Amino acid sequence: MTLKTKAMKSKIFLSIILALAINQLAGQELPITQTLDLMLMQGQYEKVIDTCRQIQVYDKVDPEIYFRLGLAYSNILDEDRSLENFYQAYSLDPDNKIYSFMLAKAYYGKGKYKPAEQLFHHLSSIDSMNWGYASYLTSIYMLYNRYDEAIDIYRRFLKNDSTNFRYLDKIGFATLKKGDHEYATDLYTKSLSLNNRNLTAIKNLAYLYSANRQSDTAITILTRGIGIDSTDMSLYSMRAQLYYAKNYNKRALDDYLVILSSGDSSELYLKRAGIGYCNNFQPRIAITYLMEAYKIDSSDYETCSYLGQSYFNLSEMERSIYYYKKVINILTPIYKQLGMSYTLMAESQKGNGMYQDAIASFLRAQTISDNPDIYMIIANLYDEQLNDSKNAIKYYQAFLDNIKRTGGTFSGKYLDSIKDRLEFLKTEPNK
């Protein structure tokens, strides 16, 4: 079959497909791509897929068909097939910016940031002032902590539009993530001067002030934000947290009640409201909120503790005891793990030659676990590593006293060797 014959058959087939499609579109005679576009606009995604697949039986090299097939799949949330078809369209026509952009977005949506970055970088090099390209590219830079590269792009746009406070916000956030709080504060302050209702700047400034222990300033600026938008519950949440940290119980309670009244019944807000009432000597109301929090998370020791306190304040001692026992049961494993963590850290410090630090950590562990072995380890460190007979004697004796008090599984021969060493150090203190 000649190429001319193949081309004729392909055209005949495409004409048939087109005729079928346009027959259902009020008889409008449109090119196939426009027909497919109209189907997409009308939400006929399955029909677009079926039509494209029929076309591809005879024509597998038309990027426009792959592109529209990709659009149809993306609209029915089939990301894998959407990506596959955008890739095919791009492969057939890599100079087409639309195909490149859609493929890059598909990669980005699938979390394939490296190939997405390459495409967005190429597109940005062609059109450096296209915010669509730059927005995705800087998002990738931010994900990989490449803050300076993101800032360079934001500055390019700010230079072109120096009154755009959003670019200042972007630079401010990247600067904040870099850890330069002072400069980030300056940037957000400038942004707020350009738009005094900019809640993004207000929230980030509040965070920066609170991070730098300027909580009163943070509270003031959050109050300003609430005056701008009293429906933004995140402003109340941030302010309530600051009030709570400063033990401003009534003020924190008022903010938590606003959040709860908005319909957000999160465990944290219920608990904090209950704590506020408890500290405000309203135990009965406190229990109402604390019990709701307890239903959500019965393993929260703080909720249980304040329930114990609230019932105590009501002289309901049996219930108070019940919840304090819950606290003890919740914290005991954590407390034991804390002791083990001090012991493990001490072993690492000992291995690093940090003997005084190791002794301090062992002693912290001993306050939690009361393990006689720890006294022996400390005694050995003083005896063998620090040549400190006085403290070695102290901890060898502490080991023996502990064994005498609590018993133990140590052999008599081992204990005799410890006693012999102790007596030697007492008679020869300068080992």
Image (spheres, helix red, strand yellow):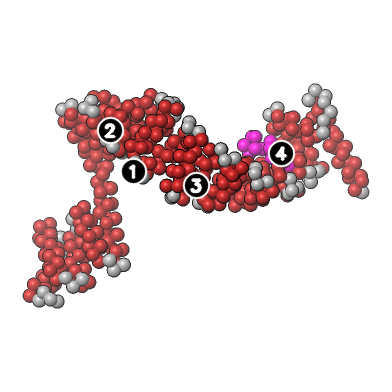
Question: Which disc, if any, is residue 174?
Answer: 3
Dot 2 falls on a residue whose secondary structure is loop
The crowding category of the residue bearing disc 3, from other C-alpha atoms within 10 Å (few below 14, some 14 to 19, many at least 20), is many
The residue mark sitting in front, 4 or 1, is 1
Q: Mark 4 points at which residue?
A: 69
* Marked residue nearer the N-terminal end (4 or 2): 4
Distance between the Cα atoms at labels 4 and 1? 55 Å
Distance between the Cα atoms at labels 4 and 3? 38 Å
* Residue occupying image coordinates x 37% and y 26%: 258
* Residue occupying image coordinates x 78% and y 38%: 54
In depth, the one of 128 and 241 nearer the eye is: 128
* Marked residue nearer the N-terminal end (2 or 1): 1
Residue 384, given in percent of the width and then of the height, sits at 20, 72
Question: Which disc, if any, is residue 213?
Answer: 1
Distance between the Cα atoms at labels 1 and 3? 21 Å
Q: Can residue 106 be seen in this view?
A: no
- Left or right: 325 as drawn, with respect to 136: left
The residue type indicated by label 1 comes to Arg
The residue type indicated by label 4 comes to Leu
Residue 106, given in percent of the width and then of the height, sits at 63, 43
The residue type indicated by label 2 comes to Tyr
* Residue occupying image coordinates x 62% and y 37%: 77
Q: How many labels sit on residues?
A: 4
- Left or right: 210 as drawn, with respect to 403: right
* Marked residue nearer the N-terminal end (4 or 1): 4
Q: Give the range drawn in magenta.
A: 66-78
Q: Measured along the vertical axis of the image, is residue 317 above or below residue 93? A: above
Q: Name the residue under label 2.
A: 248
Is the magenta region chiefly helix, strand or loop?
helix
Q: Tell me which corner region of the image, top left, top right, bottom left or bottom right, holds residue 239.
A: top left
